[in-house]
Image (tube, grey):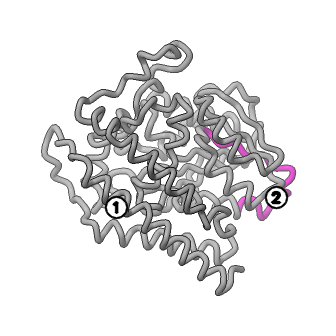
């Protein structure tokens, strides 16, 4: 159980984190011009105070989870100030390029690159209008900082909500004999929290981008029993029923409908009977009605070609078709956390 010292450390660390990233979010807004929606948005749009209240509640929930013993204090709570300055400089240096793409509607530079025949078409886009899409070291180095600015410092806290169902699942199992697969692992942020809490848990990091996998290798180097696979989440090439837990964080909203169905089916195939699937992804329309305007505007401001369809999709039916039964759905800031089970 966490005590007063840990509470103080958490409060100071997260206050500083939110101040740094929210400040950069505010400055980004002053340095850029909003993109006009193609049609009027008639859904509620939250104000700054409502969003900040949501961020505070996310941190409060994060702390309650730590206090309850569901997971430890974040391993990188005390970030290097020098590193933070360097990353902020890189972020703002790239912001002008992102802004130019946003207003030009330019989102297919990656498709025209030499590696276009090596990846599925849906993947070859400048998601978020970011430089190089997901296909360069430069992109992989900037990504986590960009996402934290977008969420005012709350991205990692949303990811950590996946550790709550994982905690309950592992309480009844021998950790060393359990295997976890993270689909679309990106730079490995979720897995770094998983391994920090369960160093004996065998994990596999799967991503389609070799550059993001390279970044994940560096982040996860302190821990053993970590495997890396470069493959699409819809066709992993991994054996049937090879994992006790499968996770997917901020993956499904970037997949076209047909691929979402294929990834759900692949997760069902990869899980052992009784296995757990944990999804952390964006809120959907109606989850928090006050945010519906932002959800509708998001794919306009940030190139997210499959987001609008995701926001309206029936995820429970999608996973039911893949043989996965929904056990729990919780909301955390801008994220939806779903816990699903493959029947025995």
For residue 5, above or below residue 141? below
Mark 2: give few (<14), some (14-19) or many (20+) Cα within 10 Å.
few
Residue drawn 58% across and 37% down?
A: 322
Give the camera-side residue of 209 and 310.
209
Give the camera-side residue of 124 and 337.
124
Residue on which disc 2 sits: 173
- For the N terminus, the image quarter is bottom right
**What span is colored magenta in the figure?**
168-183
Badge number at residue 288: 1
Q: Position of residue 177 (x, y in %)?
A: 86, 50
Badge number at residue 242: none
Alpha carbon distance from label 2 to label 1: 35 Å
Residue drawn 31% across and 57% down?
A: 27
Is residue 331 visible to us here? no
Sequence order check: which comes first, mark 2 or mark 1? 2
Residue 339 colored in magenta in the image: no
Q: Is residue 82 left or right of residue 236?
A: left
């Amino acid at each position: 159980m966490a005590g007063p010292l840990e509470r103080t450390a958490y409060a100071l660390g997260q206050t500083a984190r939110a101040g740094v990233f929210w400040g950069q979010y505010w400055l980004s807004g002053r340095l850029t011009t909003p993109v006009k929606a193609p049609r009027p948005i008639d859904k509620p749009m939250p104000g700054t105070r409502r969003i900040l209240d949501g961020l505070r509640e996310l941190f409060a929930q994060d702390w309650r989870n730590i206090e309850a013993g569901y997971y430890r204090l974040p391993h990188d709570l005390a970030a290097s100030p020098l590193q933070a300055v360097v990353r902020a400089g890189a972020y703002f240096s790239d912001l002008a390029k992102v802004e130019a793409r946003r207003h030009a509607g330019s989102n297919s530079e990656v498709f025209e690159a030499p590696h276009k025949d090596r990846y599925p078409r849906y993947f070859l886009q400048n998601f978020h209008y970011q430089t190089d899409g997901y296909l360069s070291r430069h992109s992989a180095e900037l990504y986590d900082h960009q996402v934290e600015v977008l969420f005012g410092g709350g991205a990692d806290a949303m990811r950590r909500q996946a550790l709550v169902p994982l905690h309950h699942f592992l309480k009844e199992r021998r950790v060393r004999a359990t295997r976890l697969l993270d689909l679309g692992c990106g730079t490995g942020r979720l897995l770094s929290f998983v391994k920090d809490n369960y160093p004996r848990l065998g994990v596999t990091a799967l991503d389609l981008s070799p550059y993001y996998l390279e970044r994940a290798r560096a982040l996860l180097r302190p821990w053993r029993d970590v495997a890396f696979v470069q493959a699409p989440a819809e066709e992993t090439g991994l054996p049937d029923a090879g994992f006790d837990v499968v996770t997917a964080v901020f993956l499904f909203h970037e997949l076209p409908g047909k691929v979402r169905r294929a990834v759900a089916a692949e997760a069902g195939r990869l899980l052992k009977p009784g296995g757990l699937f944990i999804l952390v992804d964006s809120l959907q329309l109606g989850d928090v009605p006050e945010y519906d305007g932002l959800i509708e505007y998001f794919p306009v401001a940030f190139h997210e070609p499959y987001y609008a369809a995701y926001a309206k999709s029936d995820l429970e039916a999608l996973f039911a078709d893949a043989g996965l039964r929904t056990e729990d759905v919780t909301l955390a800031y801008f994220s939806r956390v779903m816990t699903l089970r493959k029947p025995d």
